[in-house]
Amino acid sequence: MDIHHHFDLSSRNTLALAARARHYVSVSDLDSARAALQFARDRRLPITVLGAGSNVVLAGDLPGLVIHMAIRGRRVVDERAGQLELEVGAGEDWHDTVEYCLQRGWYGLENLALIPGTVGAAPVQNIGAYGVELESRLQCLTALELATGRIRHFDRAACGFGYRDSVFKREERDRWLIASVRLSLRRVPAPVLDYPALRDALGDRPAGDISPEEVARAVMALRRERLPDPEQTPNAGSFFKNPVVTEARARALGVRHPGLVTFPAPGGGVKLAAAWLIERCGWKGVQQGGAGVHERQALVLVNRGGGADALLALAGAVRASVAERFGVELEVEPRILGGQWP
Ligand SMILES: Cc1cc2nc3c(=O)[nH]c(=O)nc-3n(C[C@H](O)[C@H](O)[C@H](O)COP(=O)(O)OP(=O)(O)OC[C@H]3O[C@@H](n4cnc5c(N)ncnc54)[C@H](O)[C@@H]3O)c2cc1C
């Protein structure tokens, strides 16, 4: 086991925040994962699991052991008429997995193309984009308990998925190291074209004439147009979740704020477009103390050299002004690690 000490994490998070791990280890199989857990147990160290660092804000140094998930591998574990199940190591890159499946004629992931990060992190926040959420494609997953190393299988119901949410963010938070994920895929295309911008991008051809490859290409083009590339502009994607309110509340807000952008929320209620709320408060393109609200996408906060303090100060100011103007509380989407969030 190759344990590093005082390890610099600035290249391990897409916000490029400077923070160090007291101890750091990359695990590429179950044995090394168990050895890492034992190392932490022997020294009573807190554990932080990290994938590609695209959904975290490193607000300070991490005092314990950071386990970087690097378990690779993909294999078909079940195949039935028109359907297959693919088991994927948690350290595989998500987008590479989408491409891998498309190349083999295994469909279902195309709307989720180009989402950064690892396969193992995808269930943590039930990644979603362009009308599809992971929960509809996940069969089950396998995880190691951080405290004991015991293995547990979580079926879809046990994952308790919600909008950008799962048990791994709530009651099971900081308890599990997800080691592999089993995806349910189809051999027959069934494009999901409900998302208006995606439908527009694909023109008015009948759904049956549109291939999954075309859907993936359209999604990638939309994403490249709308979202900054973390390699050039450090960011963690959407910094806030779209708030979900009751229909009555959305109606009342719409009367007071004409043009309010809303979508039906999958689990009931109405989703308010957080980007619209932030833009209306005048934040789009604003730079403050080395952090900024992106000029094309108000939901994305960027690190312009000011580090975590500047970023969190800006996030706090955005949140306060949205609360004041609309009476709506924005919830931060990425996990804040190593620091305090008021
Ligand atoms: C430009 C950009 C665009 C994005 N677009 C989208 C989008 O469209 N939709 C969307 O849903 N998300 C989006 N995201 C957020 C991010 O890509 C996803 O949340 C992704 O799943 C995070 O993967 P990661 O490997 O980087 O996780 P990390 O940031 O490393 O970790 C995220 C959380 O998961 C935990 N975790 C990570 N791996 C494991 C594991 N193996 N076992 C247990 N816990 C683990 C971590 O402890 C942490 O709490 C975007 C991010 C960026 C930068």
Image (cartoon, grey):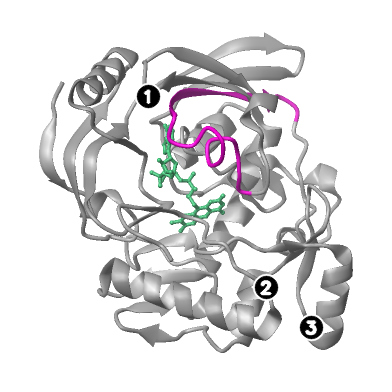
Badge nearest the viewer, 3 or 1: 1
Determine contact: label 2, label 3, CB under 8 Å. no
**Residue 75 drawn above or below residue 70:** above
Residue occupying image coordinates x 75% and y 57%:
195
Whole-number angstrom distance, CA of label 2 to CA of label 3: 16 Å
**Residue 58, image x, y percentages:** 31, 56
Q: Is residue 34 left or right of residue 78?
A: left
Residue found at x 51% / y 78%: 318
Residue stretch in magenta: 164-188
**Residue 107 colored in magenta in the image:** no
Amino acid type, callout 1: Leu
Q: Position of residue 57 (x, y in %)?
A: 37, 57
Which amino acid type is marked by label 3? Gly
What's the distance in space between the residues labelled 3 and 1, CA to CA?
47 Å
Q: Position of residue 108 (x, y in %)?
A: 67, 35
Q: Is residue 198 visible?
A: yes
Q: Which residue is mark 3?
A: 259
Question: Earlier along the polypeptide chain: callout 3 or callout 1?
Answer: 1
